[in-house]
Structure formats: structure tokens, C-alpha cells
Image: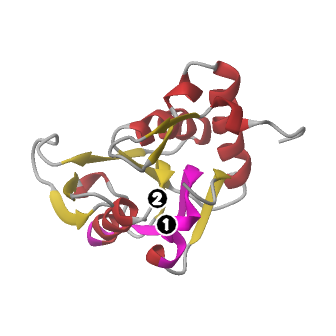
Amino acid sequence: MGEKFDLDAYIRKVPDFPKPGVLFYDITSILIHPEAFGYCVDSMAEIYKDRRIDAVAAIEARGFLFAAPFAVRMGIPLILIRKKGKLPGRKLTKIYDLEYARAEIEIHPDDVPQGKNVLLLDDLIATGGTLGAARELISASGGNVTNIFGVVGLPFLNFRKALGDIDIQTLIEYDSE
């Protein structure tokens, strides 16, 4: 990946969003800077180039933005994990707790390659709740989540403990709010 890239300079920090006292790390500012967005995709490809990843599963919506170019670059399928009510046809659903509420996500189980290794990807990893639920959906669909990736990680919210013994990679981490 060569010389050190200052990804932090491209992440907008929004205080008191979505509620007072929370500092929101907004990755949309990465997307308007091709050099920063390219750095993320290039870094992901470098991290996973020698690992056996058969598919990438992305969490709606910002996870899609990073997973799609990565899937094309790696020549692997892209599996979408969507919010409840967004997928037609046969699907599996999981209810889980967020940092501030409850939510539901869904997956088309037929999209998951049976017995194959899946990289699970989201833009930001906070408590690990969404990724944990997504991991359960992929497993229930016959896939094997071997790695988790987030552009941003917030380790002070203990996502590593919540997600257990799995390889988790991030490009940048923030140690406090």
C-alpha cells in the first residue's frame, strides 16, 4: 500500500448525531474524494489478495459502496444484506439490537455460496450488532464468514469482544467518542 495515507482527513466528524453526546464518523466524505475512495478499495484488495475469499457480503447501504468495487476487483460475487422489506422472494430475516434501537436485516439465502468463505463488510464497525446478525444469516444460509472488514472501527464500543474469534480488519480506528 506504499506511503501512509491520511484517511482520517477524509472522514467527516459530526457531533451530536444521531443523538446528543454521540460523535458520528461520516464516510460519505470519502466518496467525494476519488483518491480516498480508491485508497480504501486498493487497501481492501491488498489485505485480501492472498486469502481464500469466495464472496463478499455487504451491509446496507454504505457497505454496498465499498463492497461493489472490491467484488469486481477480486472477481467474486457480491451478496446484499438489506434492511427488512427491501428484498423480494425467499429470504431469511434476523432481528437484532443496535446501539440505539432494534432492527431487522434480510438476505437471499440462495445468493450465499454453500460451504464457501465469505468476507463480511460494512463501512463502520461500532458495537458489532449488525455484523453479528449478518454473520448468523450467512451461516444459516450455508456460508462461512471467515473475515470481517470495516473502513472505520470504533474499538471503544467493544466490537471485537461482541464478534468473537474472527479476523477483523479496519483501515482506521478511533479509540473514543
Q: Does the magenta-highlighted stretch encompass residue 150?
A: yes
State which region is magenta: 140-161
Q: Is residue 54 left or right of residue 18?
A: right
Q: Where's residue 111, x and y in %?
A: 30, 51
Residue at the spot x=60%, y=34% of the render? 11
Q: Does the magenta-highlighted stretch encompass residue 50?
A: no
Residue at the spot x=25%, y=65% of the render? 97
Tag count in the figure? 2
Q: Earlier in the sequence, mark 1 or mark 2?
A: 2
Q: In the rendered structure, which amino acid carries the disc numbered 2? A: Ala
Q: Secondary structure at mark 2?
A: loop
Crowding near the residue tagged with mark 1, few <14, some 14–19, many ≥20 C-alpha atoms within 10 Å: some
- Res. 146 in view: no
Q: Where's residue 154, x and y in %?
A: 55, 58
Q: Nearer the viewer, residue 126 or 42?
A: 126
Q: Nearer the viewer, residue 30 or 113?
A: 30
Q: Where's residue 122, x and y in %?
A: 46, 49
Q: Quadrant of the C terminus?
A: bottom right
Which of the numbered marks, if any, corresponds to residue 131? none
